[in-house]
Amino acid sequence: YLDVRAAAASLGSRVRLLGRVADDLLPALYSGAYWYLHPALAEGFGFPVLEAMGCGAPVMCSDLPVLRDTTQNGAVYFDPTQEESMASTLLQALNDQPLRQAVIERGLRRARYFTWDRAAERMLKIYTQAREA
């Protein structure tokens, strides 16, 4: 991604490309983010988005069905194939403090829904139903 690196370098210290980050450092990065931007073209579930919301980071993400399902309006959405869509969404979000606060609150509420206990209970229910079928 040489073009991305060149564009980031032109912005000086305002943008930092971190590369792979150790899992134990992610909560601090998410918590310190002014916005977490997730421009995926495809996504299986959206764990990074969910982790960011759980850490109180406001999320902007691609308008993909799986991310809408995961976030349930706990994020701001953009078309990842349209640079103008991403840029206008980012500009709006950066300049709208009430929107930022609302997205943080909705994201935290939604992230609380996803617990490992709830996941285990659902899997047990599926296994039980499969066994009884």
Image: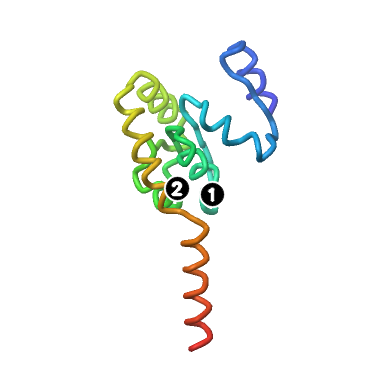
Above or below, comparing residue 71 to residue 117 in the picture: above
Residue drawn at x 64%, y 34% as measured from the top left:
25
| Residue most extreme to the front | 117
First reached walking from the N terminus: tag 1 or tag 2 = 1
Residue drawn at x 38%, y 47% as measured from the top left:
110
Q: How is the image coloured?
A: rainbow
| Amino acid at the residue labelled 1 | Glu
Mark 1 lies on a secondary structure that is: loop
- The residue indicated by pointer 2 is 67
| Amino acid at the residue labelled 2 | Leu
**What is the spatial separation of the Cα atoms under label 1 and label 2, in whole angstroms?**
8 Å
Mark 2 lies on a secondary structure that is: helix
Residue drawn at x 53%, y 41% as measured from the top left:
40
Number of the label disc, if any, that sits on residue 43 = 1
Above or below, comparing residue 16 to residue 76 in the picture: above
Q: Quadrant of the N terminus?
A: top right
Residue drawn at x 38%, y 36% as measured from the top left:
76
Q: Position of residue 56 (x, y in %)?
A: 45, 35
> In the image shown, does 7 or 131 lie closer to the viewer?
131
Q: Position of residue 6 (x, y in %)?
A: 66, 18
